[in-house]
Image (tube, helix red, strand yellow):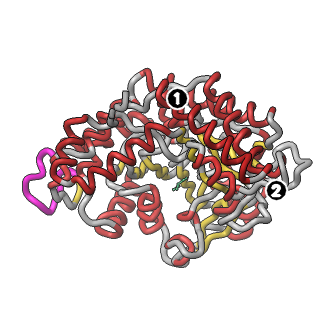
């Protein structure tokens, strides 16, 4: 059996702890033999995965380079500085904080650094494609701050149906005068017009923040317009399209914002930084600075467009009419009103295709049921899928969902058939480190 980390590493873990080793082997097999369509996931390189498992995990390094609360931090300073320098180069900005443990922590660092409790900010609501940390009522952002939400175009006759309604963004900002306007989303397939958001922020007299967690890889490769110089502050994750270890980032060109968000993150929100992850971030940023990363991101976009086109041809509706980036929201009810996101997620997983149910804009169904699924191309593209394979993926999806509508027997037979084809395709295109 092949493993995405070296066999030697697996053997070491397995010999020491067969119980944990068995779970690792099962997860490695799952990833190796299934098609990953979750838009926020990817297959990190063996170098990035190994980097996250080094002796940097042993070290406390509270503080920032040159100002630590512990001895023995010389190499912590070196690696954090290298990660910062590479992040700045990737995103063409002046300052980078590479310590956030996640995208949500990065957002918390910005909110705590730039807003006071109770302050108003404007964002897209979660159910329309936003994020938990953009004002959901159970999240810190909705509990301790005052979110106001701007809409999409909901009218199906509008040429920009289900896309950001920039006039409405402006109206919301002029009415509520938020301290911060937030753009950047988790389930939005269209290009974000950062320059337009800047105009609105200037008119409303507020700060402009972009959360580019999903599109960071595209931005770094120049395959989506950059939030700089338009945005005051930018947050991201490092593990989605950017293909690094699981973690977050805060970027800015403004020294005062850098200082405030640094202080808010540590000691305000986090304690000791995850130095092994910062080490792996540096390695991942190094990979993203190479020319082949640009080619990868071009293929990510092309593959998403191919999948969206093939599903459209099969009778599904891609929300907003298509995709400009790495993801799409698929309205299943256009294919058949009986289809739900919940059933689709389960049926597809049984056939070896992993995705997540997702509400579509203005969805009448509950979040645990939904009318849609969100699909993305970063992981399949990393495996080497191209146009032909993405068309096959669309066909697999339709075969499973069509069979599910026919009943249990038809679904069981088609699940087995598709699962075998998925496995064969995965073996033809092994995930990195598993070949
Ligand atoms: N959970 C992530 C996603 O799937 O988009 C966002 O944090």
Q: Position of residue 113 (x, y in %)?
A: 42, 65
Residue 267 in sight:
yes
Of 425 and 140, which appears nearest the observer?
Answer: 425
Which image quadrant for residue 39? Answer: top right
SS for callout 1:
helix
Q: Is residue 69 magenta?
A: yes
Q: Nearer the viewer, residue 358 or 291?
A: 358
State the separation of the CA atoms marked 2 and 1.
31 Å
Q: Position of residue 99 (x, y in %)?
A: 32, 54
Residue 222 vertical position relative to residue 126 in the rendered view, above or below:
above
In the displayed structure image, the side of residue 378 where residue 3 appears, left or right: left
Residue at 84% x, 50% y is 336
Magenta residue span: 65-76
What residue is disc 2 on? 338
User: Within 10 angstroms of label 1, few (less than 14), some, or many (20 or more) residues?
Assistant: some
Left or right side of 42 for 175 = right
């Amino acid at each position: 059996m092949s493993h995405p980390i070296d066999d030697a590493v697996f053997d070491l873990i397995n010999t020491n702890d067969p119980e944990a080793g068995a779970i690792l082997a099962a997860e490695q097999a799952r990833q190796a033999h299934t098609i990953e369509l979750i838009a926020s996931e990817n297959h990190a390189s063996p170098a990035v995965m190994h980097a996250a498992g080094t002796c940097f995990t042993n070290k406390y390094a509270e503080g920032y380079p040159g100002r630590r609360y512990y001895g023995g931090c010389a190499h912590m300073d070196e690696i954090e500085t290298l990660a910062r320098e590479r992040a700045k180069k990737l995103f063409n900005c002046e300052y980078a904080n590479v310590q956030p443990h996640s995208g949500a922590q990065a957002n918390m660092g910005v909110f705590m650094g730039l807003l006071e409790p109770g302050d108003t900010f404007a964002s897209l609501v979660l159910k329309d494609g936003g994020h938990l940390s953009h004002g959901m009522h159970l999240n810190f952002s909705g509990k301790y701050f005052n979110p106001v939400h701007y809409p999409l175009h909901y009218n199906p006759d509008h040429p920009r149906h289900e896309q950001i309604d920039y006039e409405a963004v402006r109206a919301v900002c002029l009415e509520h005068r938020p301290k911060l306007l937030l753009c950047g989303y988790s389930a939005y397939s269209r290009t974000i017009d950062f320059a337009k958001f800047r105009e609105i922020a200037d008119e409303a007299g507020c700060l402009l923040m972009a959360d580019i967690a999903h599109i960071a890889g595209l931005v770094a490769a120049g395959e989506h317009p950059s939030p700089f110089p338009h945005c005051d502050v930018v947050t991201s994750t490092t593990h989605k399209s950017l293909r690094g270890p699981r973690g977050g980032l805060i970027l800015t060109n403004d020294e005062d914002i850098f200082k405030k968000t640094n202080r808010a993150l540590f000691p305000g929100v986090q304690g000791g930084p995850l130095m092994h992850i910062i080490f792996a971030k540096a390695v991942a940023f190094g990979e993203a600075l190479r020319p082949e990363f640009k080619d990868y991101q071009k293929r990510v976009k092309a593959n998403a467009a191919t999948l969206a086109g093939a599903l459209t041809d099969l009778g599904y509706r891609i929300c907003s009419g298509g995709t400009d980036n790495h993801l799409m929201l698929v309205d299943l009810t256009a294919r058949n009103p009986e289809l739900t996101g919940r059933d689709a997620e389960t049926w597809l997983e049984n056939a070896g295709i992993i995705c997540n149910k997702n509400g579509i804009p203005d969805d009448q169904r509950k979040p645990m049921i939904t009318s849609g699924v969100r699909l993305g191309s970063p992981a399949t593209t990393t495996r080497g899928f191209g146009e032909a394979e993405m068309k096959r993926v669309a066909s697999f999806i339709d075969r499973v969902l069509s069979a599910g509508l026919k009943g249990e027997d038809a679904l069981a037979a088609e699940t087995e058939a598709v699962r075998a084809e998925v496995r064969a395709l995965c073996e033809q295109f092994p995930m990195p480190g598993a070949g």
